[in-house]
Image (tube, rainbow, N blue to C red):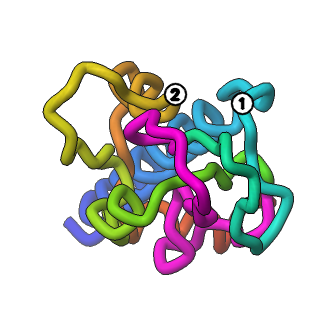
Amino acid sequence: MKLIAENWKKFINESDTAIAVTWVEWLKGLSQDMARPLGWRISQDKGTICCWCGIKVFAAGVEHIIPRGSGGPPRKRWNLAWACNPCNQKRGSNIGSAPSWREEESYGWLYREFQNAPPVPTKEQLMEYFRTHEA
C-alpha cells in the first residue's frame, strides 16, 4: 500500500510539473516583437500600449506575466510586458487571469494571447518549476 501511495504521489508531481512546463514554454514562445521592457523602469514613451487593455498610456509599468511571488523571473524579457496601472492593479498576483475592466472590444496583445493559453498552473506548480528548472 505504501508503494502505491508513493507512486501516486510521484505521478501527481510529474503531472504538476508537466502543466508548469507546458505553460512556461508557451509563454516563452510568445512573440518577442511586441514592445517589451528591458528591465525595471517606467515607460516614458507617450505611445506605450498596455498589453492587457490595448490603451496607449503616458507611463506604463513593468508587468510580470508570471508574478515574482509565484517564482516568475524578474528580469527575463519573455516574462515582462508593459501594462497600465489599472490593469496591473486589477490583475494583482493572479497568474492566469487577464484583467478585463474595459467594456470596449479593444484589448491588448497579451489579453488576446491568453484567450488561447494552455491550462494555467498554480502558484505552487510554478514555484516548483522554477526551483527545479532553468528559467
Q: Which mark is residue 16?
A: none
Picture coordinates of residue 122, whole percent (x, y): 34, 59
Look at 63% across and 50% down and name the residue there: 81
How packed mark 1 is, by other alpha carbons closer than 10 Å (few <14, some 14-19, many 20 or more), is few
Marks 2/1: CA–CA distance: 8 Å
Picture coordinates of residue 4, whole percent (x, y): 27, 58
Which secondary structure is most common in the magenta stretch? loop
Look at 50% across and 48% down and name the residue there: 20
Left or right: residue 1 compared with residue 61: left
Q: Are marks 2 and 1 in contact (CB under 8 Å)?
A: yes
| Quadrant holding the C terminus | bottom right
Q: Which mark is residue 109?
A: 2
Looking at the picture, tell me which residue is in the foreground, 123 or 42: 42
Q: Which residues, given as a range, are shown in magenta?
A: 50-76
- What residue sits right under mark 1 in the picture? 34
Q: Assign a secondary structure to mark 1.
A: loop
Looking at the picture, tell me which residue is in the foreground, 80 or 122: 80
Q: Is residue 23 above or below residue 66?
A: above
Q: Is residue 81 above or below residue 32?
A: below
Q: Is residue 67 magenta?
A: yes
| Quadrant holding the N terminus | bottom left
Looking at the picture, tell me which residue is in the foreground, 60 or 117: 60
- Disc 1 marks which amino acid? Met
Q: Which of marks 1 and 2 precedes in the sequence? A: 1
Picture coordinates of residue 116, whole percent (x, y): 38, 20
